[in-house]
Image (cartoon, coloured by chain):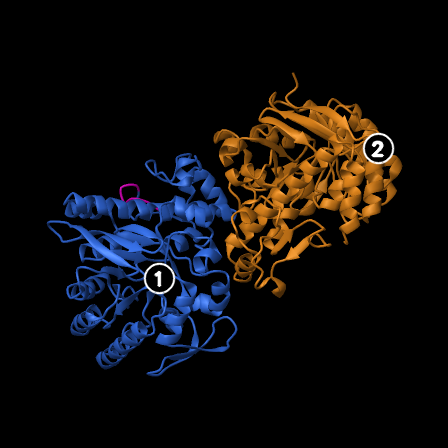
Chain colours: A orange, B blue
Amino acid sequence: MAAVTYELIHKDAATGARAGILRTPHGNFLTPLFMPVGTQATVKTLSPHEVQNLGAGMILGNTYHLFLRPGAELIQKAGGLHKFMNWTRGILTDSGGFQVFSLSDMRKITEDGVTFRSHIDGSQKFLSPEVSIATQAALGSDIAMAFDECIPYPADYDYAKASTERTHRWALRSLQAASNPRQGIFGIVQGGMYEDLRAESAKVIGAMDFAGCAVGGLSVGEPPELMYRMLEVSTKFLPENKARYLMGVGTPDHLIEGVLRGIDMFDCVFPTRVARNGMAMVSPHTAPSGRLVMKNSAFTEDFAPLEADCDCYACRNHFTRAYIRHLVRTDEIFGLRLLALHNLRYLQRFTAAMRKAILADKFSEFREDFFSAYKR
Amino acid sequence: MAAVTYELIHKDAATGARAGILRTPHGNFLTPLFMPVGTQATVKTLSPHEVQNLGAGMILGNTYHLFLRPGAELIQKAGGLHKFMNWTRGILTDSGGFQVFSLSDMRKITEDGVTFRSHIDGSQKFLSPEVSIATQAALGSDIAMAFDECIPYPADYDYAKASTERTHRWALRSLQAASNPRQGIFGIVQGGMYEDLRAESAKVIGAMDFAGCAVGGLSVGEPPELMYRMLEVSTKFLPENKARYLMGVGTPDHLIEGVLRGIDMFDCVFPTRVARNGMAMVSPHTAPSGRLVMKNSAFTEDFAPLEADCDCYACRNHFTRAYIRHLVRTDEIFGLRLLALHNLRYLQRFTAAMRKAILADKFSEFREDFFSAYKR
């Protein structure tokens, strides 16, 4: 039996949006699902019990960060990432590729892998499919990601083609390097912003013996319509019986548009990052932008919860908008915590609502209801 | 019936150290007790449920900070400080005097009160016994403190004498300004570092109709022996049937020496402040200094809890020294939270152990056990 499998439960009749179950060594999780990001073995500001209590099933750990600090060997000695950070549900680790390209200095790409300088101390490091997969095997995540290059935007056709072909060779090497039987490996579709490269990449990655397929290299600065188009031509050629994961996407509008195009899984720092900027994520029916900027003086004497129908720790326990505004204005960490808890719970409720709509064959109505109120 | 009363339950036979009960509108709390500091309507980094779960009965709120932001009127509109911050147990508010003298700029003291500039926006503000007591009445704390001047150290005799006499006149005005029947007011003994002024101040404050008596102006830079001596000559003249509160003191050695000299209550930012500096408070039997500096490389592969016999959230849930070191090194807020939870729980266990020793007439043995291991 494979460590990680996906079962398609139902497709929305009108749109084909998918509801399924992702089975992992640390539990079975309903899809569509959103993974909070725990970059450095902690979901920023929160305890693992809080993340569990808000309903998250899978979280994401960043191999690049953990590789540099504290190092995979230490985490392996601690009994693996689950035990090190005391998280009992699922963990997906990325390959480190994205951060090598976005965070490190002086990177040099060869067929073998990527040499780069650590953004922490400037020391020279090397990541390759083999090193990344061995690192993720040591971390002991439930799902490891193949090592890829995230193509910058914009990129010319020849660069995108050559990079995508190398990513395919790296994908095969990633699969061949697999050593942890309690870990599934997902491949990553690239192809830049070119329809033919995307389609070809989806076919190639979809044909390899991965436990699931991710779509990478999107939400990197391109217009939303272009992202949606690239997503469409990617998922079109992916196998039905494997989970599909859109990497680094986490705003509600993108979640809807991703699910509409056959995506099952998402991750993004957005809900925790905007929490640290004093922002609450809310339904567009509460605020058309889907966001409350808590420093706004409109909330000075607002003794209502962030959202009346929300069951998150903050809303359920009578922490008012006025109180949260006070905490944000005075730079109190508890304010960030309340907003992080609320925002992550909002996305858990949001993905659960999408699933419910799909099971009832009402995903189009769900989507229309959202966009009728939403003003970007 | 007075809003706040103290009942002396037992005095340690050999030392006279006190075990008692403090009764307040929000519950009865065993003494000796330590109050975590919730300066800006939050105990830094923690939720009120966490503070309650670690066993704290009373917390302290800072009138100076709340007076400036968000203002007592807003908190009153929210239903009082308890409701605003969602804390159901006891709250003691200080008078604002100490922060006016330590934080603000361009303060000018007259018989009427203190004019100062806000450390936040430079605006001119005024605090007096009447303004402070009215502010604390609006906050709705269980215990309000009389408005006083905290004499700087060192100060010459004439300044200390004049200031202490003014503090006595302000104490009377504070009592006369009382307006909240669900609030007890504590007076504050001053007197600088002069035995005769301390004794006189204790007699004057002790004779006024306060619900309890605080000793202020200590732990302001003087040597410990001088602090202990001043404490002795203060508590000697305080009434037995009222709670005695040593302000701004919170290291274990000072707690023992305070209780030895008849103190019942303490507050200090120490446990939460050192948590933010990556420090864990532990028994001197664990580390002679009573502190673990978590960044220390000795903890890199230390998979033990902070303290083996501790029942705090961090120690109970297998968050190891190695993990906490990783969080501190990577500036992750969850590391500060774990240390704050541990340190505050440490002091709750410590005060409970002192009480137990007093009730068994073994406080001297408790003290000797501590100091036999403790190396400052």
The chain identifier of the residue carrying mark 1 reads B
Residue type, numbered disc 1: Arg
2 and 1 marks on the same chain? no
Badge number at residue B182: 1
Residue type, numbered disc 2: Ala
B300 and A117: which one is in front?
B300
In the rendered view, tell whether residue A120 sits above or below residue A176. below
| Secondary element at image label 1 | loop
Which residue, given by chain and number where applicable, does mark 2 sit on? Answer: A14
Residue B84 pos. (x, y %):
48, 58
In the picture as drawn, the residue positioned furthest to the front comes out as B1
Apparent side of residue B336 relative to residue A183 in the rendered image (left or right)? left
Magenta region includes residue B50: no
Magenta residues span B281-286
Q: In which quarter of the image is residue A9?
A: top right
Residue at left 50%, top 76%? B122
B339 and A296: which one is in front?
A296
The chain identifier of the residue carrying mark 2 reads A
Residue B64 pos. (x, y %):
42, 68
Residue B98 pos. (x, y %):
36, 69
Magenta region includes residue B285: yes
Q: Is residue A10 visible?
A: yes
Mark 2 residue crowding within 10 angstroms, few (<14) / some (14–19) / many (20+): few
In the picture as drawn, the residue positioned furthest to the left comes out as B14
Query: Which image quadrant: the C terminus of chain A?
Result: bottom right
